[in-house]
Image: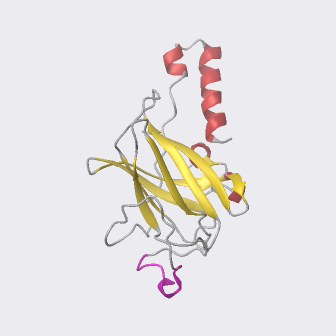
Amino acid sequence: MNRRELVQSAITAGVLSGLPVKAATELPRTPRDYTGPFYPKGPRNPKNDLIVGEPRAEILHLSGRVLAPNGSPHPGVLVDIWQTDPNGRYKHPRDREQDNLMDGFLYWGEALTDAEARFRFRTYVPGRYAARPAQHIHYKVWQDRKELLTSQIYFDELGGARGLARSERAAALQTVSLERIDDNSVAAGLDIVI
């Protein structure tokens, strides 16, 4: 069950059980997940486009919104992502493959939500690596330098969380679908509820 099905199920359950409409329409909060050992070190990349120059692998257009459980937007918050390159390497001293990093890829970036709380990134589809076979993107949400959430995004078409999320319910709320745009790019959308 993905996030959309889970939200619809919660709404239906609330309506059928006679709960007040307000309780029935409250969005489930995005679960926390592990920061992992590869949170970026060094100067930040304050860009939402992680690809420099001509793309060299499948592009992922990642977008979404940051919302409160009642659906109201959180404008002006920072969404901070980090991930592997398509070959499964992190730009981090603890990743032993630092000599094989992909040229023209920034590995992490930031996007500020707009007035409707939307954010967007252009990146690559993350690669898999032996320690975590589930292809994923890590993220943090910040407001006024205060961390509001750390979590991860998994992808249905790439095998989902593969038992690596904190629970089945968490995996459903963290897993999104990829939509094919053209031969070399896909899109995914995620609403982050905090």
Magenta segment main secondary structure: loop
Residue 171 visible in rendering:
no
Q: Nearer the viewer, residue 143 or 16?
A: 143
Left or right, 138 with respect to 176, comes to: left
Residue 75 vs 159, above or below: the answer is above
Residue at the bottom extreme of this rendering = 99
Q: Position of residue 1 (x, y in %)?
A: 68, 41
Depth order, front residue of 43/171: 43
Q: Residue furthest front?
A: 54
Front-lying residue, 83 or 151: 83
The image position of residue 145, as x and y in percent, is: 26, 51
Q: Residue 23: x and y, percent? A: 50, 20
Q: Is residue 40 magenta?
A: no
Total labels: the figure holds 0
Image: 85 above or below 151: below
Q: Which sits in the foreground, 165 or 155?
A: 155
Q: Residue at coordinates 61% horizontally, 76% vertically from top-left?
A: 87
Q: Quadrant of residue 172?
A: top right
Is 96 inside the magenta-drawn segment? yes
Q: Which residues are magenta?
A: 92-102
Outermost residue to the left: 144
Quadrant of the rendered image containing residue 109: bottom left
In this view, 187 is above or below 23? below
**Which corner quadrant holds the C terminus?**
top left
Residue 107 visible from this viewpoint = yes
Q: How is the image coloured?
A: secondary structure
Q: Residue at x 51, y 81 (%)?
A: 101
**Residue 174 horizontal/vertical position (percent):** 57, 48
Residue at 48%, 61% (x, y): give it: 49
